[in-house]
Amino acid sequence: MSVQQINPLQANEILETQADAVYIDVRTEPEFQNGHPAKAINIPVVLPDPARGQMTPNPDFLRVVESRFPKGTKIIVGCQMGGRSQYAADLLIQSGFTDVSNMQGGFGGARDPMGRVVAPGWVQSNLPVETRVDDTNRYSGPAK
């Protein structure tokens, strides 16, 4: 089983037409709070580690996803540019999820070293953005 690759327009179409489809935003909580696709649920795949000054894998990512969604759920995974979401999608497939798509371009668009957008993201595609964060979409990891 492999991860399907889709663009933001395809992701939006799936979310609008398949009521049981889920968009998991794997960015950090502050990134999510600054704006996210409508109906997104925040479950970070990596977390900042201030002691080391870098991002580290969220040890609870799979547990939280598995506690909220059956393995057959249509899941779209997105991040800021597409890298973290690919990592998360691979983890989900490896753990037995069967219908996982990575949204290429992420929320803000994938960029080359010069800063040019090479894969438009959710924002560049002019899709609905919301900033609402509440108990239905915020990260509810072990400390929450």
Image (cartoon, rainbow, N blue to C red):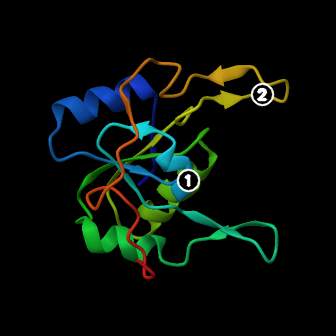
Residue 98 lies, in percent from the top left, at: 32, 57
- Location of residue 9 (image quadrant): top left
Local secondary structure at mark 2: loop
Left or right: 23 as drawn, with respect to 32:
left
Residue, x 26% and y 58% (percent of image)? 136
Residue, x 82% and y 74% (percent of image)? 52
Left or right: 26 as drawn, with respect to 135:
right
Lower sequence index among marks 1 and 2 = 1
| Residue type indicated by callout 2 | Asp
Residue, x 85% and y 24% (percent of image)? 114
Residue 128 lies, in percent from the top left, at: 35, 26
Q: Which image quarter holds the N terminus?
A: bottom left
| Residue type indicated by callout 1 | Pro
Q: Note whether 54 is above or below 101 in the view shown.
A: below
Residue receiving disc 1 = 30
Seen from the viewer's position, the closer of residues 36 and 13 is 36
Q: Which image quarter holds the C terminus?
A: bottom left
Residue 43 lies, in percent from the top left, at: 44, 61
Seen from the viewer's position, the closer of residues 34 and 25 is 34
- Location of residue 45 (image quadrant): bottom right
Residue receiving disc 2 = 112
Q: Residue furthest bottom?
A: 142
